[in-house]
Image (spheres, rainbow, N blue to C red):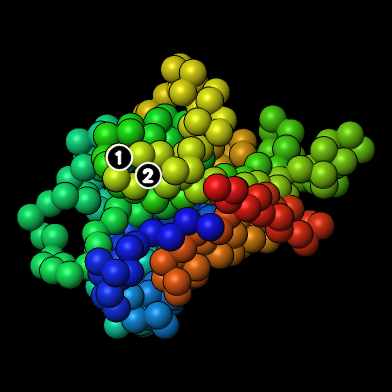
Amino acid sequence: MIELINKESYGQKGLFSYIVQVGTGGTGGYVTQMISQMLSIFNINGHFMIADPDVIEEKNLKNQLFVKSDIGKKKANVLAKRYSAAYNIPISSYSENYVEDLEVLKNLFYNNHLPNIGGYLFIPVIIGCVDNNYTRRVLHQFFEWTNKCIYLDVGNDSAKVPFDYGQRPMQEWSEKEKKEYDESGWDGQVVCGVKLSNKTILPPIAEVFPDILKDDDEIAPSQVACSNIVATDPQRLLTNRMAAMSVATYLNEIFQSATISNRMTFFHAKKGYMKSIEVTQ
């Protein structure tokens, strides 16, 4: 188990968790709701920022936490306003651009709006709810640059569908296509990276799965139409919810006891299980 603070130095005050969540898509919206509610329940001294420039479309209403009147608005802005009001906590949003370079991410954490946190241990917390390795590499660069950080990355598989998904009804799919769809899109993982006093305690996602850093040809999110991604890589509602719950288990422990007991969690929504790998020190 990792103890994030020295209680003799910080006493009863403990952590000031400055959380930046990148991505508010299928999993991200549920993560936002859970984080917001836990910040309120635990009365956490900290700040929560949501970063995502995506605009809400009608197709998002089926599997994301939006309603018809939200269409045309920025996802991050809607979620920040909603849950800030619902749980009476400070939540801000960044919806100007995608987080595609290190300087943008630095500014989200270290800006002129950082409150006075005297007596608390400030620690940046990144929640990566993205479906592309381009952004993961940027988040990894921040982890390498900063001297302290908690970096939670959540990812899950998409359901395998025919190339003409959305145009041909499922009744016309072959048995092979139906089987591939039924057996895919259920599993995923959360990886927890931790860096304290400029020392990596737990490796982040890009060190656990180093192919992320080798994926140099991937296009930046700003250059990809979201509608094209959804059309070819649909995600399951149940999987998104279990992914968010997996992230919440880490934050629940951080908020409650300022400790981290697990370094990775695997989940499978259809089979209904979640298995974590404990920290060994």
Residue with the mark numbered 1: 198
Image coordinates for residue 76, horizontal then vertical, percent: 33, 58
Residue 139 lies, with reference to residue 236, above or below; the image says above
203 relative position to 40: left or right: right
Residue with the mark numbered 2: 195
Callout 1: few (<14), some (14-19), or many (20+) C-alpha neighbours within 10 Å? some
Task: Determine the secondary structure under disc 1.
Answer: loop
Task: Determine the secondary structure under disc 2.
Answer: strand
Image coordinates for residue 77, horizontal then vertical, percent: 29, 62
180 relative position to 136: left or right: right
Which residue occupies the extreme left position in the image?
Answer: 112
Report the residue at 77% width, 61% height from top: 272
Image coordinates for residue 204, horizontal then vertical, percent: 47, 39
Closer to the camera in the image, 161 or 204: 204
Image coordinates for residue 46, horizontal then vertical, percent: 27, 68
**Contact flag, marks 2 and 1 (Cβ < 8 Å):** yes
Q: Which mark is residue 98?
A: none
**Residue 15 shows up from this direction:** yes
Residue 117 lies, with reference to residue 192, above or below; the image says below
Q: Amino acid at mark 1?
A: Asn
